[in-house]
Amino acid sequence: MSKTTLLTTTAIAVALSVGLVLGGGYVAFASTASQIQGGLNNVGGGSGGNLQDGIQTVINLLLFLIGVISVIAIIIGGIRYTTSNGDAGQTKAAKDTIMYAVIGLIVAIMAYAIVRWVVNVFM
């Protein structure tokens, strides 16, 4: 990953984080925090929970995070594509960024399906 890509990704992540916190996104963070706490209670043998529910909660959280990262990567690729000014190298790099983000999202969804099947069959 080049320095420019890393810097752009970091800047966008910080801007989104600040925007979510200041723009009312704290509700989503509170909901995620309560889901994490619920998953920890389930895995830790808390009242009324089981291991399968804990695993499902962790998987859902990770899939959500992967989805957010993929969307950010697609947006970055789109911005790079529109600002490439017709330069073949920059255009190819932008297309590759978009393609790898989509492939990563597809792999994550397939992994989710496999893990869910394994959990349902063996637990």
Image (cartoon, rainbow, N blue to C red):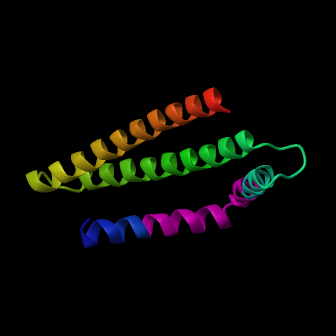
Residue 87 in sight from this viewpoint: no
Is residue 114 shown to the viewer in this render? yes
Region rendered in magenta: 11-32
Q: Which of these two is toward me, 37 or 80?
A: 37
Image coords of residue 102 (percent x, y): 36, 40
Q: Residue at 71%, 54% (x, y): give it.
A: 32
Q: Quadrant of the N terminus?
A: bottom left
Tell me where residue 78 appears, x and y as whole percent: 31, 49
Q: Closer to the camera, 94 or 65?
A: 65
Query: Height in image: 3 above or below 107?
Result: below
Residue at image location 42% in from the left, 69% down from the top: 10
Label total for image = 0
> In the image shown, does 112 or 121 lie closer to the viewer?
121
**Residue 82 lies in the magenta stretch:** no
| Residue 100 shown left or right of residue 109 in the figure | left
Q: Please state, as top left, top right, bottom left or bottom right, where the C terminus lies in the image.
A: top right
Outermost right residue: 47
20 is higher (above) or lower (below) than 86: below
| Magenta stretch holds residue 20 | yes
Where is residue 34, by image quadrant? Answer: bottom right
Task: Kindly identify the residue that appears in the image at 34 percent across and 72 percent down.
Answer: 7
**Percent x, y for residue 106?**
40, 36
Question: Residue 13 vs residue 122: left or right?
Answer: left
Q: Residue furthest left?
A: 88
Q: Is residue 71 left or right of residue 25?
A: left
Residue 6 x/y as whole percent: 33, 68
Among all residues in the image, which is located at the extreme front? 122
* Secondary structure, magenta segment, majority class: helix
